[in-house]
Each structure stands twice: as C-alpha cells, then as structure tokens.
Image (cartoon, rainbow, N blue to C red):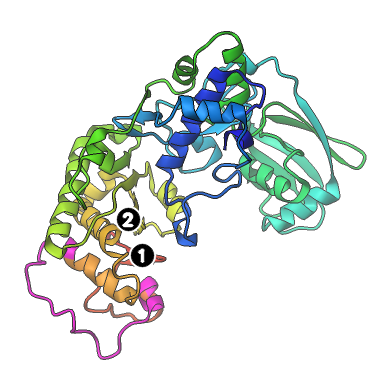
Amino acid sequence: MLAGEGQPAAADAAQQALAITARTFAIANRNRHRREGFDLCDTTHCQVVRPATAVTKRAAEATSGRMLLYQGQPAFVFYSAWCGGHSELASQVWPGALDYAYEPSLEDDACAREPGWTSEVKASDLERALRAAGLRGSSLRDLRIVSRNQSDRVARIRVEGFNPPEMNGHEFRMAVGRIVGWQALKSTAFDVERTSSGYRFRGRGFGHGVGLCVIGAGHRASRGATADQILRFYFPGLSVGRRAQAVTNAAPGRPAGAADIALALPGSEEGERAALLSLIRKSRDELTKATGAVAPARLRVTVHPNVESFGRATGQPWWVAGATDGPAIDLLPIAMLKQQGQLERAVRHEVTHAVLDGALAKRPMWVREGAAAYFASPLRKAAIDPRACPARAPRNCCVRYPQAHSAKPTPALNPASRARSPTASVGIK
C-alpha cells in the first residue's frame, strides 16, 4: 500500500508516518465492502495497492502494529497526496461526515511552496461529465464559483445551462474526474476562467486534503521531524500505540475494553459518550445472553449531528431513528431520540440487527425485523412463538415500504419501521 500511496523518495520518517496512518485507516474501516465479500478495495476509495519496495517494507516493519489511537481504539483518519497548504475538514468533502477535533483544518507551511497546477477542459467534455452525473442539460453556458469554504476550496459552483444549476465543489470534481480524468481537477482549491474552447482551471493541492498530507509529511521529514512529530502535527489529540491488549485477552465471543465499540459523536453530544457506551454494551450483552449469539468483535456506532446528515449516510427518511449494516450502526442525534422517548429502544433495535442479522441472513426480512422489534420492546417478556406468522407472510418489499402495500401495519412489526437493505431500522413518531 505504501508504494501506491506514498512518495518513493521520501525520508524514512515520512514513510513510517504514512504506514501508521494507512494501517489505522485499514483497521478502522474493516467491513467497508462487507456486502461485496471483502474489507477494503484497492482503489482511491480505500487504499491503492502497488508491489512493495525495500523502502516501504522497511517502514512497515519499523512500525509493525503501531496505530493512531483515540480513547484506546483505532481512530478514523484520512490522508491525501497534497493538501495545497491548508488541510480540509471531512464534512466539507463528504456531507454528513463528522469533524473530529483530532483531524482539524489547519495551515500546512511544509507544502505551501509547491507549484500549483493548470489544466484546460473542453466545454463538450464538461457537458458529458455533468450529464453522466445526472444533471439535465445540453449546453454549458457558463461556469462560475459561487462560494468557498474556510480552507479556500470551492464549496459551490454554478453550471449555467444545466439543472440543477449548482453543484457541491467536491461532487463537481468527482464528476469531471470520472469522465475527463483525475488530472483535470486535482483538487477543489481552484479558480476557473473561460477559454475559446472551454475552461481553464488553476489550482493547488491533489486529493481531498483531509488529514495527513503526504507531500507535507515528506518535507517535514526532510527538515528532521520524526514520524511521531509528523503525526502529532496532522492529528493533534491522537496517540500512537498498539491496540488495547484487553481485546486479545477477552473471552471468546465477548470483547472487552474500549475497543469493542467505536463510537463517533458530534462535538455537541460528546458529554453523552459514557452513558451511550454503557447502553450499547448492556443491550449487546443482554442480547447475547438471551440468544446465545456471538456479537461482532467490534461495533461501529455513528451518531449524526442532524437529520440531514443521517439521511445522506443511510438513505433513510426523516422519521427513521436508526439504521444498521453489518456491525455498523447509524443513529439520529441523541437529543432528538431522547425528546421522542426513543433512545433506549432505538439502540436496542439496532444492536439486535448487528448481532442477529448474520445468523438470520437466509430468513425473510420480516423475521429479522420482528426479532429486532421484539428485543427492543420493554414488553418483550411476553412469550412469542417463532413459528407463528401471518397466513400470508410479508415480502421483503412490504417490510421496507409498508405504506406502499397496506394502510394497516403488519401486527408483528413496528408500523414506522423502514429497512436499510439488507437490514432494518426503527422509526420515530
């Protein structure tokens, strides 16, 4: 991986800093492609892979087992080729992503003197890119930057002649890259002007700019900085160490210690961390005791700052409180769930999906959703015969979209439920 993502000629300290960062990313993002049957892909979506060299092997061996840790567990970190002199916040690249205090947007003087880039793109190529991205239109009449964010990257860009007439800067770059090539717009830190055949872009940076800057790390290493010093600059607040030993010493099927749950919270709800972790663990442990199921080695729980963020991440409508995909759980803001009196129920519902859906994968969706509704209910002491079912068992689409099939909810299911294929979610009223 280092050979595919790093600078071949960079000093050992930079190679080691990237090795630690990439290892952390890989561990924290396990199951990212669970639906396809593997953990990580070998593209820029995850990590580009190239044959190892003597330099990269030395860096990997020198940092063996070391990761960036937040509260004892691998942190969610990023890295890019060149931040252009100012790193970016995750939320500015991926709407709805959480901005961690340990991965801020900051001035990076180490790479500020790198020469910028220029590219020219034909109007016809831009039009093809916009249509491929789903916009409607045939002729691009004008291209104009509407707004920039705090790192001076393009936040919104106007594409006159197409509908919708404006785009997010990152989405525009992705659309152009897929059709024209990734060298056309190396970053969203650019200016644009019209030419006789299209548009000229002048910019700085290469990649999204979040987290560690590979070129900046190389310059810092050449100045004498160690790998730990480089990492402290790009990830203030994180420590470098090995994964908590409590995980390896845990009893089979029962993870222990902080690393059994990766919990991401908005800054405004950080004070809820201890109580929410306790509720998640209690729900998981009660469920495994009651069913004999083996919980995932690690649950990944993300509490979103607002409904819009939750919807973008999960594809669920506003009335849904939580969604689960494998060991990954997404929840609405805690304050909102508390206000609706749904916090404990939503957590238990999603934890049930995370623990039981694997074992019930071959059963109809109504069985999985029914199990989650049962174990989430405070009245679950009542006996339920699993053999009992409606005379006409509901199809998966009936569970995902009940209102489209019947004005009357299926008795065993929560009428506000919605499914996030291949699992289900609980709704709020």
Q: Nearer the viewer, residue 218 or 124?
A: 218
The image position of residue 29, as x and y in percent, is 43, 44
Q: Quadrant of residue 55?
A: top right
- Can see residue 315? yes
Choose mark 2 or mark 1, whichever is in front: 1
Query: Would you call the spot at circle 2 few (<14 residues within 10 Å), some (14-19), or many (20 or more)?
Result: many
**Which quadrant is the N terminus positioned in?**
top right
Residue placed furthest toward the bottom: 391
Residue type pointed to by label 2:
Gly
Above-or-below relation of 348 to 338? below
Say if the magenta span includes residue 100: no
Q: Is residue 404 left or right of residue 7?
A: left
Q: Residues within 10 Å of mark 1 (few under 14, many from 20)?
A: many
Q: Which residue is mark 2?
A: 322
User: First in sequence: mark 2 or mark 1?
Assistant: 2
Residue 22: x and y in percent read: 50, 34
Magenta segment boundaries in residue numbering = 375-401
